[in-house]
Image (cartoon, rainbow, N blue to C red):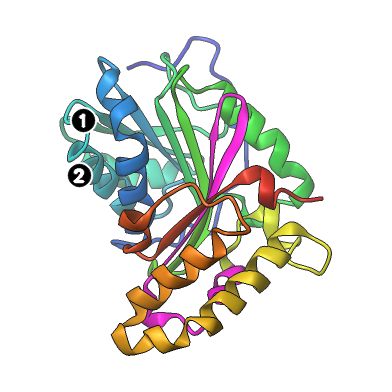
Amino acid sequence: MAPPPSAKRPVGTVTRGTTNPNRLRRMDRWIADAHGAALRRAPAPVAVDLGYGAAPWTAVELLQRLRTAAPAVSVVGIEIEPARVAAAKPYEREGLTFRHGGFEVPLAEPPMLIRAANVLRQYDEGEVAAVWARLCARLAPDGLLVEGTCDEIGRRHVWVALDRSGPRTVTFATRLGSLERPSDLAERLPKALIHRNVPGEPVHAFLRDFDRAWAAAAPYASLGARQRWIKSVRDLSADWPVVDGVRRWRQGEVTVNWAALAPS
């Protein structure tokens, strides 16, 4: 797939490039579950790993995980740093290519998925809305943008899912054995929310209530962290618009409507 003739200088700035194998596994598995049906409906779905970093592992793994849900999908890794693209080229194979570019997403056809993980952390909060709008405008009609942040080994992760109309949901995901309390995930909030974790903001109230539900579910700890998490999320859903169910909660996840957590 060739870039459009009007392609110009890539939009964006170079990231630190930090990456590790399996770092984005929680996000990938959620995407395969939540967006798999849409990917299967598309005749030749393309997914973009935007800003994959100094090594191509996350793009390689994205292809593997998405193909469990949509065997026809292909992945394009896009990086703004030319040396990183050159280093990734030997890993190209059927369904996986690498390209120089940025937020303009230099593809001839709109992708069904853009995943931008750990890309916006270095930007100012005031820049996020414009980046989201630019990326969403590049999506196919049923496409999804997933933008978020995780720690270096993927134990804790928070992401926002957006379609062409804007943000839809926020997902919190963790390895439950590493969790002291749900608010530990605050340090991994995406740029649009991380500075809003203060009294008076919805995301702060959500994490406060999540911690309270976690504390109240302490007796379930004897059954394991998973059962305690499920009980906490079930109780939390009485007051917050949780949009997924036990099958995802068992994975150490919870997804909430964006509107409930959006900055006030």
Counting from the top left corner in percent of width and height, residue 73 is at 24, 28
In the structure shown, which secondary structural element does the residue marked by tag 2 occupy? Answer: helix
125 in magenta: no
The numbered mark, 1 or 2, whose residue comes first in the sequence reads: 2
Counting from the top left corner in percent of width and height, residue 77 is at 37, 38
Q: Residues within 10 Å of mark 2 (few under 14, many from 20)?
A: some
Residue 209: quadrant of the picture: bottom right
Front residue of 54/211: it is 211
In the structure shown, which secondary structural element does the residue marked by tag 1 occupy? Answer: loop
Regarding residue 207, the answer to whether it shows in the image is yes
Which residue matches tag 1?
95
Residue 34: quadrant of the picture: top left
Regarding residue 155, the answer to whether it shows in the image is no
Q: Amino acid at mark 2?
A: Gln
Q: Which mark is in front, 1 or 2?
A: 2
Q: Residues within 10 Å of mark 1 (few under 14, many from 20)?
A: some
Which residue occupies 39% across, 52% down? 245
Q: Is residue 196 above or below residue 47?
A: below
Contact, mark 1 vs mark 2 (Cβ under 8 Å):
no
Which residue matches tag 2?
64
Which residue occupies 19% across, 25% down? 72
Counting from the top left corner in percent of width and height, residue 54 is at 40, 55
Q: Amino acid at mark 1?
A: Gly
Which residue occupies 33% across, 90% down? 222
Q: Is 181 displayed left or right of 195 in the figure?
A: left
Counting from the top left corner in percent of width and height, residue 133 is at 65, 29
178 in magenta: yes
How many numbered callouts? 2
Q: Is residue 210 above or below residue 60?
A: below
Which residue occupies 32% across, 17% down? 1
Magenta residues span 160-187
